[in-house]
């Protein structure tokens, strides 16, 4: 029986649609402390991607947001959505992405439904809505334990470095 891409079985068996941190770091330029995608468990080029962010109390922003009640900042949830989308763009463009960066342009309709806290595993579901030239538009949902914690639509521009 074949594993479905993005399933636990597919991820454990090294599905071609699963991206570990080394492959993510090849695709996008972000690095610690601003790399906010730990794994991509499913990617369908030109369609969608599912990224994972494991939220740990050891992350430096929890020192100030908020020390007595740590909450993963909403703006970083949006950034993890953008980084997951950037991996989708780079993998869709293939070799033609060489020497290019994905720049955030707009964020619309952002809604935060529930706090994300240390110990949570956030799954970021990104779907390409359309592309016109070097402008790409996406819809995304972040989920913890299958429940939507945030959502947004946004646009990005693909430009030379």
Image: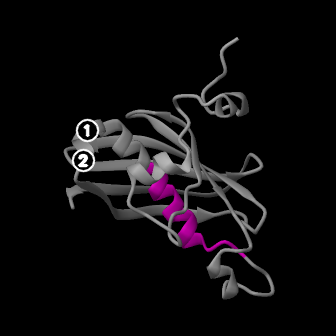
Element class at badge 2: loop
User: Which x, y percent locates residue 58?
Assistant: 71, 74
| Residue 86 seen in render | no
Q: Quadrant of the C terminus?
A: bottom left
According to the image, what is the colour scheme of the structure?
Answer: one colour
Q: Quadrant of the N terminus?
A: top right
Rate crowding at label 1 as few (under 14), some (14 to 19) or many (20 or more) other CA atoms within 10 Å.
few
Q: Are marks 2 and 1 in contact (CB under 8 Å)?
A: yes
Residue with the mark numbered 2: 98
Question: What secondary structure is the magenta-colored segment mainly?
Answer: helix
Residue 82 occupies quadrant: bottom left
Residue with the mark numbered 1: 95
Element class at badge 1: helix
- At horizontal 37% and vertical 39% (from top left) the residue drawn is 91
Left or right side of 64 for 81: left
Q: Which residues are magenta?
A: 71-85
* Residue 20 sits above or below residue 119 on the image: above
- At horizontal 55% and vertical 56% (from top left) the residue drawn is 37
User: Which x, y percent locates residue 72?
Assistant: 66, 71
User: Which x, y percent locates residue 54?
Assistant: 68, 58
């Amino acid at each position: 029986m074949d594993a479905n891409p993005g399933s636990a079985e597919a991820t454990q068996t090294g599905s071609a649609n699963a991206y570990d941190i080394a492959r993510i770091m090849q695709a996008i330029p972000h690095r610690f402390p601003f790399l906010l995608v730990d794994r991509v468990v499913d990617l369908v080029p030109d369609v969608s991607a599912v990224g994972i962010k494991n939220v740990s109390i050891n992350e430096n922003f929890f020192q100030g947001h908020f020390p007595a009640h740590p909450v993963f900042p909403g703006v970083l949830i949006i950034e993890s959505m953008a980084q997951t989308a950037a991996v989708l763009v780079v993998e869709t463009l293939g070799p033609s992405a060489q020497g290019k960066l994905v720049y955030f342009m707009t964020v619309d309709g952002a809604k935060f439904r529930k706090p994300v806290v240390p110990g949570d595993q956030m799954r970021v579901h990104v779907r390409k809505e359309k592309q016109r030239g070097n402008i790409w538009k996406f819809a995304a949902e972040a989920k913890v334990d299958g429940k939507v914690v945030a959502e947004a639509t946004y646009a990005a521009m693909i430009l030379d470095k």
